[in-house]
Image: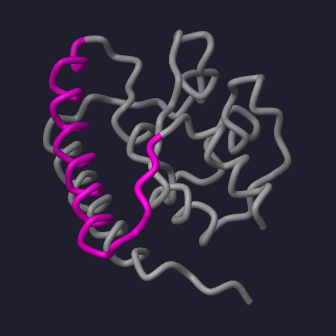
Amino acid sequence: MKEKSKNNPNIKEIYKQLEEELASINPGCNTCGTCCHFDEFGHVLYTSTIETDYIKDNVEVPSFDPEKNVCPFLVNQECSIREHRALGCRVFFCNPHYKETLAEIYEKYYTMIKDLAIENKVEWHYAPMMQLLKEKEDNT
């Protein structure tokens, strides 16, 4: 059995705080999976190594083509890893009225995640999620 990263409880707590903050502003999400088709939004989902480690520690990453720019965890138009999804997924909503507020929230929690990496002397790499997942897959 694969050993989980020591950052799992910490990142989980950060995500819990984020979910509570998002619930307080209620930007709305109908879980349709549309936002997971990154090219349709002209979007590249960035994550950190801590986030991709958290994903890989908790779910199996399916084979995927990173050139397609569609989340490999999108199954039947739904997120198959909703509980373990990255920060960028958690704060990206189709509702344009929250764009500015969510950018501020993203920066706040991005800083918390980066501080976690620094505190635990974990390599910090911030790149497109598809690239980081593929690198991790190639290195295992």
Tell me: 129 left or right of 63: left
Could you say where residue 1 lies in the image, as x and y percent from the top left?
A: 74, 89
> What segment is highlighted magenta in the picture?
97-126
Could you say where residue 51 lies in the image, as x and y percent from the top left?
A: 47, 56
Tell me: 16 left or right of 94: left
Tell me: 97 left or right of 126: left
Give the image quarter of residue 37: top right
**20 is higher (above) or lower (below) than 43:** below
Give the image quarter of residue 15: bottom left
- Quadrant where the image shows the C terminus: bottom right
Q: How many marks?
A: 0
From the viewer's side, name the closer residue of 121 and 113: 121
Could you say where residue 3 lies in the image, as x and y percent from the top left?
A: 62, 86
Q: Residue at x 73, y 46 (%)?
A: 134
Q: Main secondary structure of the magenta part?
A: helix
Q: Is residue 52 magenta?
A: no
Give the image quarter of residue 104: top left
